[in-house]
Image (cartoon, helix red, strand yellow):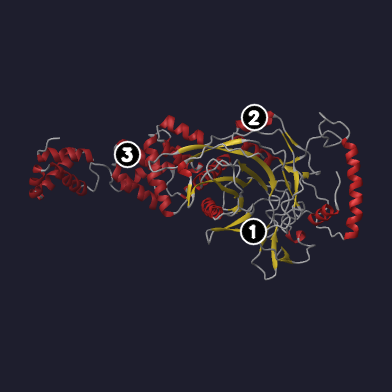
Amino acid sequence: MTLVDTRTPDPKRLIPGATGDWEVIIGMEVHAQVTSNAKLFSGASTAFGAEPNANVSLVDAAMPGMLPVINEECVKQAIRTGLGLKAQINLKSVFDRKNYFYPDLPQGYQISQYKQPIVGEGIITVSVGPDRQGNFEDIEIGIERLHLEQDAGKSLHDQHATMSYVDLNRSGVALMEIVSKPDLRSSDEARAYLTKLRSILRYLGTCDGNMDEGSMRADVNVSVRRPGEPFGTRCEIKNVNSIRFAGQAIDYEARRQIGILEDGGAIDQETRLFDPNKGETRSMRTKEEAHDYRYFPDPDLLPLEFDQAYVDALAVGLPELPDDKKARLVASLGLSAYDASVLVSEKAVADYFEKVASGRDGKAAANWVINDLLGQLNKTGNAIEETPVSPDQLGGILDLIKEGTISGKIAKDLFEIVWNEGGDPKAIVEKRGMKQVTDTGAIEKAVDEVIAANPDKAEQARAKPTMAGWFVGQVMKATGGKANPQAVNALVKEKLGIAD
Amino acid sequence: MSVTIDTVKRVAKLARIAVDDEDAERMTGELNAILGFVEQLNEVDVAGVEPMTSVTPMEMKKRQDIVTDGNKAGDIVANAPATEENFFLVPKVVE
């Protein structure tokens, strides 16, 4: 791969050092577990959390004489992902053996794709921000390639004094390795890239993006240079398993490299590990032999070939992706770009919002979903899937506001009740007498009572009209918040003789 | 193209095959004879000829995404020299 610099150094992304500014260059290799029932080349299950070696076939354990047969769904998932990344789909690709020895790799090689991957160059648009002015900046990050490969098994080192435990359940599970170009220029951009990639994968349903379970892991390549100079020597930080850690690892690694260079040293190209507890990267045991994988085409597998019609059929079945959805929400519902991007960041949130907004005012629905629903979920630490308020219930609350049955303030109380106790919003309003009082007679009576009870305050208000707000508050209190605030305001002013 | 004894030793090490000096010496000669033959093949002009991947034209067989295998951890580890609760046990490897 020839490294091409596509970006112009941007002063606001530079890192100040003791001897001047530095620019950090980042490229990512993301391993995304393909969503499928069975493994890439065997009929064993991919389910997470099974008993040791329960999801293992003789193929995955590399027993002599076993032959791989490719799972067609994994091929389709890779093509769908390629289409979602606006990438070149290669109608012919080849599986190669990547040879190395490790106890969790029973074959002694990983079946991967080397010179002819299934997906070529593509692009991801990443939104970075907000900056101090609240603005977002869209940048395009190039995708170098996506290829299919087998995952390895898992080693546990802390179960025994002198032995390691090996579980092959993950051995042979399909992975997509998605390689970016070295287009990222800050830890913020790197985090935004991972977030966007995960969102696209989840929309497509090709990877669940669950980093806790290891379904998505990133190898992060970091180097630094003086702005305008050629790329420096890079270090690869292996197996970063959270987006936050990726940001921390990059910040630490950039500082470390700048420190070495400013002291007149040189960077060794090496593989490093990120330690989340210490927040630092450290060198992995240097391999005695440099990476020498001796790739060659796997003689057990024919080239993977399909025609354009096969790709086109998959393209037709693709769901609407976050960028398109965002554009549609802005154009057809008049949402702000910020609100739209919050709503589309997770597919489940977007689906929820679209149910609430269906047949209702989009902006009101967006406000309620973002401020109230997501706000409350954030507070309780729950995901949208665990919401106690369904889209129908929230929609019901919005309808009651629209009809004028309840005020916006009462609606907040109603939301609390539905959140805690459930139930049909309309029935709750009926049963608990939460309806807005629009009957002028009743409001008038309340206004009269408050004025009569507070003659001194009434006097002050006549002299200083801003005091009228106090009366509005008292009347709202007296009516249990059910009075129509506009009506109360008008009546208070009228009764006190304050001109509008 | 030819190989030196150092290359033979390195390849043997990468393949985890124990080769002593005497064997390495002999293999260097054998490998160079093979490479000489390949060089002879290289004299044939194959420009514009697709690499042949199979003697009979056929498409790669594919399987459906159905779980048809597994749940035999006991069989999987049956030949292992050391196991515990259906894990393989191997000499400790720590980064």
Residue at 60% across, 57% down: A273
Nearer the observer: mark 2 or 1; the answer is 1
Nearer the observer: mark 1 or 3; the answer is 1
Check if mark 2 and mark 1 are on a common chain. yes
The percent position of residue A373, horizontal first and vertical second, equals 40, 46
Element on which disc 1 rests: loop
Residue to which mark 2 is pinned: A312
Figure check: A25 above or below A108: above
Estimate how packed mark 2 is, as few (under 14), some (14 to 19) or many (20 or more) residues with alpha carbons within 10 Å.
few
Residue to which mark 3 is pinned: A401
- Kind of residue sitting beneath label 3: Ile
Q: In the picture, residue A424 is in which quadrant?
A: top left
**Side of B47 relative to A337 (left or right):** right
- Kind of residue sitting beneath label 2: Asp
**Depth check, front residue: A120 or A265:** A265
Mark number displayed over residue A284: 1
- Kind of residue sitting beneath label 1: Met
Residue B89 visible (yes or no): yes
**Depth check, front residue: A128 or B47:** B47
State the quadrant of the N terminus of chain A.
Answer: top right
Estimate how packed mark 3 is, as few (under 14), some (14 to 19) or many (20 or more) residues with alpha carbons within 10 Å.
some
The percent position of residue A394, horizontal first and vertical second, equals 39, 43
**Side of A241 relative to A492 (left or right):** right
Check if mark 1 and mark 3 are on a common chain. yes
